[in-house]
């Protein structure tokens, strides 16, 4: 967790992309890799240079993570730094997006997207909740002093409950995260509601007061929201036009606003002017966004290399104090790699990202060829590379790089990862119980063999799955009701079990926070509505 201190990298307004994001083994001082220069040039969009210019470029000092490029005057010829990034003079009028430019990319990936509105989830239903609802106590031993008035609010819901305040409201999407003690829902009309912990303004209501039950974010009342994501203390919201709004904690620059502040309690549009955004995800203190062309951008805390820029951003500010060079605006993840059995590092070309998922300190992406890449913190084997080494750039997960064995869906938990293969099998790696043995590479989950999975979510250590006509959950002790087994029933399970309290209720989508679960239950038929009416109603006490 990035709590040791921060320092934003000073980027002069005339500098283009940040320095080299290539792994050290890929720098062009290695003569054996020079024949592959055209391939690197194609991936990164670096213009062809003559032999004399290339030789002059290779004599320059190597670009190091966190190092800025030499100053350039308008009209000065481009400079090629080792690593292959092309630094160009600034455009007329100066740089955009806070002075940070992404490396040049292939022209096809930079062409404009057709103008069309994004569509949200097509499912509709009622929201159900179970698990811990004392939002300020979740993941803590004591409630903070500034929140002591809320100490006795909330309770553990051991079975599914309906929110009384949402009677008659159709929900199409529900969002939380493995680090989050707050939640979001998107209504059928595209309105965004939020509730839960709010110490950093992550609920978007313009204040830092805790909210017990779902409440409309009025600032976004005129926007049609199609997607949202929750970090530990920050939130992103995506509109139908491809714009992203951010709110909550910004100490590490995880809101992408070009600055660092303790809290931003009102939704603010991120500092980005590229292609429309179509997907996004949040880690504990970093964020990922994906544009319509399949380019991935990251910003926030670079610890463990979780941003994918070949650096953990760590430096010693002074004696016994470590700080981080945070990315304050979206920066493109420029290169994807694979490692051979003999340890060689090779670039993977033509990666077009189709989906992204974030754990606390790691990221998964799924590309158009059904390949899975992972990077960030490697502890407990959550990256799936059969080792616990941190990865600074996206690395190919070998298991899914074979014909007929590609992935169709990806999910990230706090310290684990999941993927559903194109044939429907569920694979797991990492650890849900960190006191037990870890799974260092993807293995099939035999308990769910044959189930057709449509939605999966991970909490701190618990898992919930919507498959076929059932809802399935499991997780080690301690749990707080997020498994939904009901009162006077076992509170935890190390093996997957059907949630009997939801028998006869069709689950459209599941989401899970740090210690609570959210379910969208279909209510189309009279029989389904009657089943839902029999569930208890939760009306939390407020101050």
Image (cartoon, rainbow, N blue to C red):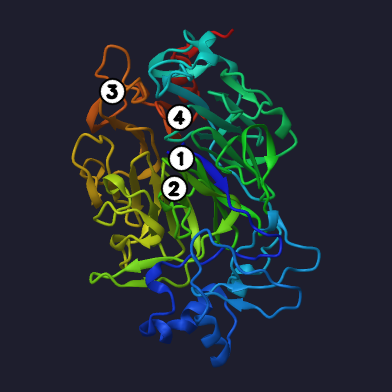
Q: Nearer the viewer, mark 3 or mark 1?
A: 1
Q: Observer-nearest residue: 438 or 512?
A: 438
Q: Are marks 3 and 4 in contact (CB under 8 Å)?
A: no
The residue labelled by disc 1 is: 2
Q: Earlier in the sequence, mark 2 or mark 1?
A: 1
Q: Are marks 2 and 1 in contact (CB under 8 Å)?
A: yes
- Count of numbered circles in the view: 4
Q: Observer-nearest residue: 484 or 131?
A: 131
Q: Can you say which quadrant of the picture contains the C terminus?
A: top right
Q: Are marks 4 and 2 in contact (CB under 8 Å)?
A: no
- Residue 299: in sight, yes or no? yes
The residue labelled by disc 2 is: 303
Instruction: Report the side of 425 relative to 507 (left or right).
Output: left
Mark 4 element type: strand
For mark 1, does the 10 Å Cα neighbourhood hold few (<14), some (14 to 19), or many (20 or more) residues? some
For mark 3, does the 10 Å Cα neighbourhood hold few (<14), some (14 to 19), or many (20 or more) residues? few
The residue labelled by disc 4 is: 519
Inter-mark Cα distance, 3 to 4: 21 Å
């Amino acid at each position: 967790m990035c709590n040791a201190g921060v320092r934003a990298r000073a980027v002069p307004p005339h500098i283009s992309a940040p320095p080299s994001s290539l792994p050290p083994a890929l720098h062009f001082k290695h003569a054996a890799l020079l024949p592959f220069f055209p391939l690197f040039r194609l991936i990164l969009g670096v213009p062809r240079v003559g032999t004399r210019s290339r030789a002059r470029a290779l004599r320059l000092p190597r670009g190091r993570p966190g190092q800025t490029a030499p100053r350039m005057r308008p009209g000065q010829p481009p400079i090629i730094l080792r690593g292959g990034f092309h630094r160009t003079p600034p455009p007329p009028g100066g740089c955009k997006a806070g002075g940070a430019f992404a490396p040049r990319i292939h022209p096809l990936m930079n062409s404009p997207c057709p103008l069309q509105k994004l569509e949200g989830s097509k499912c509709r239903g009622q929201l159900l909740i179970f698990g811990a609802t004392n939002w300020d106590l979740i993941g803590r031993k004591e409630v903070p002093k500034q929140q002591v008035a809320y100490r006795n609010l909330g309770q553990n819901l051991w079975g599914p409950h309906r929110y009384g305040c949402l009677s008659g409201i159709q929900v199409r999407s529900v969002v939380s995260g493995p680090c989050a003690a707050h939640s979001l829902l998107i209504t059928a009309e595209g309105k965004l509601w939020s509730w839960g912990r709010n110490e950093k303004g992550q609920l978007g209501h313009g204040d830092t007061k805790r909210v017990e039950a779902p409440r409309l974010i009025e600032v976004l009342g005129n926007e049609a929201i199609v997607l949202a994501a929750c970090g530990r203390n920050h939130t992103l919201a995506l509109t139908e036009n491809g714009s992203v709004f951010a709110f909550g904690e910004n100490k590490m620059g995880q809101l992408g606003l070009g600055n660092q502040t303790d809290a931003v309690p009102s939704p603010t549009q991120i500092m980005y002017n590229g292609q429309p955004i179509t997907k996004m995800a949040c880690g504990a203190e970093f964020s990922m966004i994906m544009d319509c062309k399949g380019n991935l951008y990251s910003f926030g805390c670079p610890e463990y290399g979780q941003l994918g820029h070949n650096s953990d951003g760590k430096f010693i500010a002074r004696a016994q104090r470590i700080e981080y060079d945070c990315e304050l605006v979206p920066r493109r993840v420029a290169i994807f790699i694979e490692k051979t059995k003999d340890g060689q590092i090779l670039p993977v070309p033509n990666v077009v990202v189709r989906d992204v998922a974030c754990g606390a300190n790691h990221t998964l992406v799924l590309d158009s060829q059904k390949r899975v890449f992972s990077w960030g913190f490697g502890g407990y084997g959550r990256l799936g590379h059969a080792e616990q080494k941190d990865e600074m750039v996206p690395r190919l997960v070998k298991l899914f790089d074979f014909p007929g064995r590609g992935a169709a869906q990806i999910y990230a938990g706090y310290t684990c990862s999941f993927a559903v293969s194109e044939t429907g099998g569920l694979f797991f790696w990492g650890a849900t119980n960190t006191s037990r043995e870890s799974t260092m590479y993807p293995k099939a989950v035999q308990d769910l063999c044959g189930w057709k999975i449509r939605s999966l979510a991970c909490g701190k250590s618990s898992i919930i799955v919507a498959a076929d006509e059932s809802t399935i959950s499991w997780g080690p002790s301690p749990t707080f009701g997020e498994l939904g087994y009901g009162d006077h029933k076992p509170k935890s399970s190390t093996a997957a079990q059907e949630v009997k309290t939801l028998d006869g209720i069709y689950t459209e989508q599941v989401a899970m926070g740090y210690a609570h679960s959210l379910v969208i239950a279909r209510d189309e038929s009279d029989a389904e509505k009657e089943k839902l009416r029999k569930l208890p109603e939760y009306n939390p006490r407020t101050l």
